[in-house]
Image (cartoon, rainbow, N blue to C red):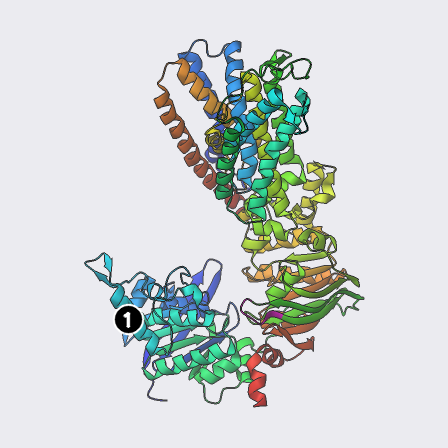
Amino acid sequence: MTTATAHPSQTWLLLVLRLRTFVALILVLAYFSVMAPNFLSAANAVIVSKHVALNAFLAIGMTFVIITGGIDLSVGSIVGLCAMVAGWLVLNGVDTGLGWTVWFNTLEIVGITLLVGIGVGFINGILITRLNVAPFIATLGTLYIARGAALLSSGGRTFPNLGGTDEMGTASFPFIGTGSVLGLPVMIWLLVAVALGAHYLSRRTPLGRHIYAVGGNERGAALSGVKVNRVKMFVYMFSGFCAALVGIIIASQLQAAHPATGETFELNAIAAAVLGGTSMSGGRGRIFGTIIGAFVIGILSDGLIMMGVSSFWQTVIKGVVIVLAVVIDQAQSRLQARVALAQEAAASR
Amino acid sequence: MTDHPIGLSIRGGVKVYPGTRALKGVDFDLRMGAVNVLVGENGAGKSTLMKVIAGVESLTEGRIEMEGREAHFRTKADAVKAGIGIVFQELNLFPNMTVAENIFIGHEPVRGRVDIDQAAQASATAALMARLEQDIAPDTPLDHLRVGQQQIVEIAKALSQHARILILDEPTSALSAAEVEVLFRVIAELKSQGVGIVYISHRLDELIRVGDYITVLRDGEITGARPMAGVDIPWIVRAMIGEKTKEFPRTHVAAFGEEVFRAEDVTLPRAGGGFAVDHVSLSVRKGEIVGLYGLMGAGRTEFLECVMAQHPGSGGRMFVDGAPLVEREVAGRIARGIALIPEDRKRDGLVQIMAIRENLTLSSLGLFTKGFHLNLKAEAAKAVEFVKRLTIKIASPENPVSSLSGGNQQKVVIGKALMTSPKILLMDEPSRGIDIGAKAEVFRTMRDLAAQGLGILFVTSDLDEVLALSDRILVMANGRISGEFPAGTEAATVIAAATPHTRKDQAA
């Protein structure tokens, strides 16, 4: 086998393009540490990470969905709904209608709330796989339904004072969003766990491989024995799980749950995934890319705030960055395809 | 027959594609007011010749003459201007639009450059439909029409651009017998109006019936051209496939093992009545290569899809090693030892953006999995093993499969199927879209696999291929098995069985 070498400048360019999200992260970091003196301080790093983490959870779930060629617009509403569910359980428990109320401890509340998020994902999956509703429409529908349900749960009011009590076993509820372990916030540990798990899933399990195959060629995957519907069900349920986690964290952090929590979060999640190199046409994307994408977006907005740039300009800049990312992504795909073609043409000679 | 003037001729036509010469110095005369039949095997150059005439492709060498002058068609629009219309095998229509809109798409009658003159469009459409003896209202949505009627709409579209020459590429492949009769009446009518028709088809009896002149192509060369009078099927077959020796001789006379696969009464209802697969029963033995020959639309692909659990509405029973095949999902059938190599690699066979390794192992990930954990090392080793075994020439198994040539891609598909350790291999047009060298290798691979005891059922519409490779030949027509022949059967016999109308004509 003769290995045809691509032109060295091409190889370099390809490497830079492949690591573009990382390069962007370094650039953004460097820029702000020069422009905003306190930016690189440990305290600020923790603050930024906490902002980024919420988006990163959603973006991880979103990445799997987008890799299968779908989209999940409902995650922001699931965040809101799940925050309300957690708030309700802490505050009111569940009235059995028999004159007594069932109370749950923190762990049970987390479990139930996660199940609610997974349940909405399950509904998305059923709509998409069994009833053949386009993912965009199905999740647009559940976006409204879940948001409506969140508003109905409290009549539009906020559930306040979710500090919990010792006798109900809920005093630990605020710990999820505000506590620290070994000097790092709990939610950062959670993010590390979810990110590592998702990365492992995507690279080292048959399910992960099937997720990519479904997005690359659904028919081809089906004919190869991939259970396409099951794969799709999983990604929407996982996305719902991630959203529920964010809902719990926010309710715990604020010790309050507001039904409007999470509005437009889905857009930031999509932006992070795309910025991290996930292809909207499916089949391509990496968990770590997405996380770096979430960091770029988060650092960009926090850094601009510290520099005192108007939030209106921030919005414009975020848009420019996203569009730029996709343009570069296209260039990389083309170059990569060209290099591979040249190598294979040489090998088959 | 002297009253058929030559409307268009090609002299010394050569067309070179990268790697192949599709036309090797072709001289072709197209006579007006007559049906000029063009026949040849897949890849013989018929479609290329027609694309040249229709301006879709241009000649590498040689020239096109019309009325004594050289004509240059750089685009399809040039050819349309010269009065040439083509109806492709795959209809290019918009199901969401009306008949009139379809006919006038791209050349709508307009008032003041922007406003479509609906009334003029409708009346012109009505006139065309009257000319074609069709009772179709101009405002009928196209998707309300049967395929045969849609074909008529395509013809009307060509006529609306004042076509004097009309090319019909396999116009009857999707038509019912009654619709074929309508089409033939339309053709006769157009002929009497002086239109020159080029008619491409694989259905030999049909050609003899409808044609006035016949041209036979083989490997880019014309091997026969004459008026139709006196032509019979054996003459056409000789001109089509020649006296070639078989290129893929059996390496040994195999003793077949026991039956590995059997299908009984497999049916697949067709939308709108009838059966696409009509009570098909067949069996394959270990080490046997069974060739399933048939024309387009005979139901061969659909049958394979039924075996691979692609049609929930299909009926019948299937057995692997004598045990009934009850699994309803593809994964289950793969586990039982069935593997399919689909006709359309791009659409069905491969995930183009995934790596070669990932494509090879996609059906067999279970081999490398413990619990959840996928052992990437074992996977990569297995992929390399199959790359070597099938002599796939690649630079790196990590490159996307889309960077490979057609032949190597096909080997990846075969590798993916073999990795599942199948007992029976279903191959749908295994040599489509790959060059001669790769073809020979794929055929050699098939022989080797059969020698190792695999049962192979392969579908083809290439007569050479089915004759050369098969230990047993099954012929399908109109959804049914219409003939079964041992290896070494005459080509003409096989063709006759594949052409459903022939027997009727002989009986009559």
Q: Residue at x 54, y 36 (%)?
A: A285
Q: Residue furthest left?
A: B112
Q: How many marks?
A: 1
Q: Residue at x 65, y 55 (%)?
A: B414
- Looking at the image, which is closer to me, A283 or A11? A283
| Number of residues whose C-alpha sits closer than 10 Å to that of mark 1, classed few (under 14), some (14–19) or many (20 or more) | some
Res. B313 image quadrant? bottom right
Residue B352 within the segment the image draws in magenta: no
Q: Residue furthest front?
A: A99
Q: Is residue B335 left or right of residue B245?
A: right
Q: Which residue is mark 1?
A: B124
* Label 1: chain letter: B
A283 to B449, vertically: above or below: above
Q: Is residue B299 left or right of residue B180?
A: right
- Looking at the image, which is closer to me, A317 or B2? A317
Label 1: state its secondary structure: helix
Query: Percent x, y for residue B202?
Result: 52, 75
Q: Is residue A343 left or right of residue A302?
A: right
Res. B92 image quadrant? bottom left
Looking at the rendering, the stretch of residues picked out in magenta corresponds to B271-277
Query: Percent x, y for residue A157?
Result: 49, 23
Quarter in which the C terminus of chain B is drawn: bottom right
- Looking at the image, which is closer to me, B338 or B233? B338
One can see residue B119 in this view: yes
Res. B158 image quadrant? bottom left
A63 to A94, vertically: above or below: below
Query: Percent x, y for residue A275?
Result: 47, 31
- The amino acid marked with disc number 1 is Ala
B215 to A336, vertically: above or below: below
Q: Residue at x 54, y 34 (%)?
A: A62
